[in-house]
Amino acid sequence: MRGCVGDERCGNAVLRHFLQTLGVGGLDLLVQVLTMIEIRKAETRDIPDVAAVFIASQADALPYVAKLHTPEETFRFINDNVFVTCEVWVATEGGRIIGMMAINRSHIDHLYLQPGYYRQGIGTMLLNHAKKLRPAGLSLYAFQENERACKFYRNHGFREIERGDGSDNEARRPDILFEWRPEVAH
């Protein structure tokens, strides 16, 4: 671009244009390359690390849920329920599991990140991976008081379907059913 040498505004404009050109899938790829984050299907050998992320994330973001079970009970739940009924995916950095997502048919049962890894695009990478796996649509629940998660899902195209009073979940906390459907081209 002419006249751009040494002009920071021009460089910022070029960067903005580059990022817009990449689109969502390209941004995911760029984030993966820059951060060396890998999304892969979990294996049974990953159960202890998946359980550790699950426990740490709940203790940090959902302390009212974390108090419902001991770490041993949670490990058994991950082993005996989540890995049996769900397709489990993990986000890794340098081989270390830093995020997990469990999908049961077209419902995301769990999406958790290791504390300290929030707001770095990792949750977005997992969610976009789920959208690729289930292009017809997805649903999930979030606790109403978990404002960070509710905002995250809304920002990623999920819309609120219904609110519950908590009588249908183990924590007995009001929740929201969210749904994502791909945009229909007109």
Image: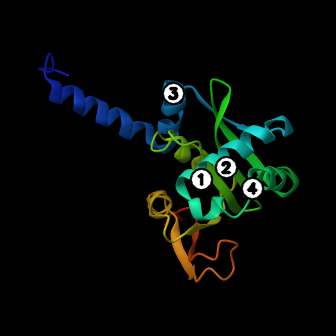
The residue mark sitting in front, 3 or 4, is 4
- Among the 4 quarters of the image, the one containing residue 93: top right
Q: Which mark is residue 3?
A: none
- Asked if residue 133 is positioned above or below residue 157 in the image, the reply reads above
Q: Name the residue furthest top.
A: 5
Under circle 3, the secondary element is helix
Relative horizontal placement of residue 70, taking residue 63 as reference (left or right) = right
Measure how far apart labels 3 and 1 are at the Cα level. 26 Å
Residue annotated with mark 2: 55
Measure how far apart labels 4 and 1 are at the Cα level. 11 Å
Label 1: how many Cα within 10 Å (few below 14, some 14–19, many 20+): some
Between 25 and 124, the residue placed more toward the observer is 124
Residue annotated with mark 1: 59
Amino acid marked by disc 4: Thr
Amino acid marked by disc 1: Ala
Measure how far apart labels 3 and 2 are at the Cα level. 24 Å
Counting from the top left corner in percent of width and height, residue 144 is at 51, 72
Q: Is residue 100 visible?
A: no
Q: Is residue 27 visible?
A: yes
- Determine contact: label 2, label 1, CB under 8 Å: yes
Measure how far apart labels 3 and 4 are at the Cα level. 33 Å
Q: Which mark is residue 70?
A: 4
Residue annotated with mark 3: 35
Between 109 and 32, the residue placed more toward the observer is 109
The residue mark sitting in front, 3 or 2, is 2
